[in-house]
Image: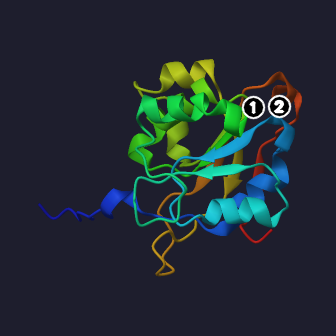
Amino acid sequence: SGRLVKMRRALDKYYSPELFGTILAKHVPFNAEHGFIFEPCSGDGAIVKGLKSIGITNKIITNDIDTSSPATLHMDATKHHVWTKLKNADGLLGPMGYVVTNPPFVDAQEILEMGMEFATELVALYLRLSFNEPTHSRVGFLQKHPPRLINLARVSFTGDGKKDLLNGAWFLWPISDRLKAVQLEVFSHANNE
């Protein structure tokens, strides 16, 4: 048919650069007293490394469905029981304050909705800007929960230096009154800050 068909990587493995976590940590007031950070699609752990590089002291629980990843857990983050299991461990971990991840785009809505149900402070997902398009499946959610954005320049997720066709952003959904009151403005980064 003349159309270019591009194969997706197994498990949609397109790892984020560490800089994504660093940029997020510079603009979001994470507080260890308000719960742990759950990274449900942690891949190679770069976002967590970026958060820690800025001095984030929250306990961080990582998860990735790929058992070869260095994550703490290896469960399917689209399943409600995974999130319930973490909530039930509240006595050991404290509350799930924050959800921070770059999810596979195809699973983003499910993971977002789980995060909104279980996090007590903030859900932050790195997504292509097209996620903000009010499609039939997202329009109701986006109207009820408009995100705040940290826009980022396009990056290479393939390791070959070729940048993604679309740029993305950290989509932020403050949940707690504390973070709703914080001015989480729209920022743009050239990915070198």
For image coordinates 49% across by 37% down, the residue present is 111
Q: Name the residue nearer the viewer: 157 or 90.
A: 90
Residue pushed farthest bottom? 160
Label 2 CA crowd tier, 10 Å (few <14, some 14–19, many 20+):
some
From mark 1 to mark 2, how far is it between C-alphas? Answer: 7 Å
The C terminus, quarter of image: bottom right
Horizontal and vertical percent position of residue 131: 51, 40
Residue pushed farthest left? 1
**Tag count:** 2
Q: Mark 2 points at which residue?
A: 179
Mark 1 or mark 2, whichever is nearer to me: 1
Q: Name the residue under label 1.
A: 121
Q: Name the residue nearer the viewer: 166 or 104.
A: 104
Q: Residue 99 carries which label?
A: none
The N terminus, quarter of image: bottom left
Horizontal and vertical percent position of residue 160: 46, 81
For image coordinates 63% across by 49% down, the residue present is 61
Label 1 CA crowd tier, 10 Å (few <14, some 14–19, many 20+):
many
Q: Which amino acid does label 1 sit on?
A: Glu
Residue pushed farthest front? 92
Q: Name the residue nearer the viewer: 174 or 132.
A: 174
Element assignment for label 2: helix
* Lower position in the chain sequence, tag 1 or tag 2: 1
Q: Which amino acid does label 2 sit on?
A: Leu
Horizontal and vertical percent position of residue 58: 78, 49
Element assignment for label 1: loop
Q: Does the residue at mark 1 contact the one at mark 2 (Cβ under 8 Å)?
A: yes
Q: Is residue 93 left or right of residue 39?
A: right
Q: Is residue 77 visible in the rendered structure shown here? A: yes
For image coordinates 60% across by 30% down, the residue present is 87
For image coordinates 64% across by 60% down, the residue present is 47
Horizontal and vertical percent position of residue 184: 82, 39
